[in-house]
Amino acid sequence: MAVDTAVRPTQTSTAPKAKPKKRRSSVGLKLLMAGTGLLLVLFLFAHMAGNLKIFVGGDAFDHYAHWLRDIGTPLLPHTWYLWIQRAVLTVAVLGHIAAAVILARRARLARPVRYAHRPKVQGSYAARTMRWGGVIILLFVIFHILDLTTGTVNPVGDARHPHANVVADFAPSRWYVTLFYTLAIVAVGFHLRHGIFSALRTLGQQSPRGERRARTIALALSLVLVVGYLSVPFAVTIGAIK
Ligand code: HEM
């Protein structure tokens, strides 16, 4: 990058070279966060689009879920695509978390003294909630897989009838499940708003106008996802989907 190669008047030829190297790898880690985050966001949009099929009808939703297992056939054997997707998503989640942990540790070490009071800079609230938001999302995904993929904690738990699983899941008597999903999806929304904004900034949108645009895009995409995801449990709870 131009910043690293520029010769500053105060620099001598014997200046230590470790700092620019570390800065470069931090950029690499931010790119890793942005790249893995983008992959996860793409999955979230595709998954939301699939979930919205439930408004077309129970058969359409079940058909979609069965089709997921046949993507790539006959080139790939039955369910192979799904397993490849699961492997890619798992690697992306692990890479995303590892990069976040290393970057957070670096930021802490770069600070000579701990802040007595956190500075009230714009966006610091969102940045602090990222860690806990991420933990909530991870716990939610584990519960969600046990609920709607394996059916272990679902009242119906029949892999051949995902529509029946979803309807049983968000029945009015199971309001606490709907509440948990709502909290988790709102956490996803906050996480995405800050994540998409940071990613767009990492990729170069650093002028005040670019930042404003990045903020608007991040908010709009997050709102679409939150509303799209929440529409399913709420439609079941109020009886619009049976
Ligand atoms: C209310 C909203 C949601 C509904 C109704 C829903 C529904 C479903 C259903 C029915 C399945 C099973 C698909 C199948 O095996 O045929 C599933 C799987 C899954 N969902 Fe969701 N989902 C929701 C929100 C989310 C969110 C917010 C995330 C991520 C943060 C997520 C991540 C996943 C993952 C990782 C799987 C496993 C996919 C696989 O089997 O490989 N879901 N979901």
Image: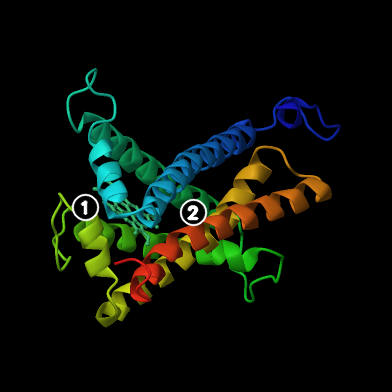
* Quarter of the image that includes the N terminus: top right
**Residue position for label 2:** 105
Determine whether, in the image, residue 58 is placed left or right of residue 213: left
Q: Who's the residue at 71% across and 66% down the image?
A: 121
- Give 56 or 232, whichever is nearer the viewer: 56
For label 2, the crowd category at 10 Å Cα-Cα, with few meaning under 14, some 14 to 19 and many 20 or more, is few
State how many labels appear.
2
Find residue 140 and report its horizontal and vertical position in percent: 32, 63
- Give 165 or 9, whichever is nearer the viewer: 165
Q: Earlier in the sequence, mark 1 or mark 2?
A: 2
| 170 vs 42: above or below | below
Do the numbered discs 1 and 2 sit on residues whose CB atoms are within 8 Å?
no
**Residue position for label 1:** 149
Find residue 169 and report its horizontal and vertical position in percent: 25, 68
Element under disc 2? helix
Q: What's under tag 1, amino acid-wise?
A: Thr
Find residue 76 and report its horizontal and vertical position in percent: 22, 22
Find residue 15 and report its horizontal and vertical position in percent: 69, 31
The CA span between labels 1 and 2 is: 35 Å
| 50 vs 140: above or below | above
Q: Does label 1 point to a residue whose CB lies under 8 Å from ligand 1?
A: yes
| 99 vs 54: above or below | above
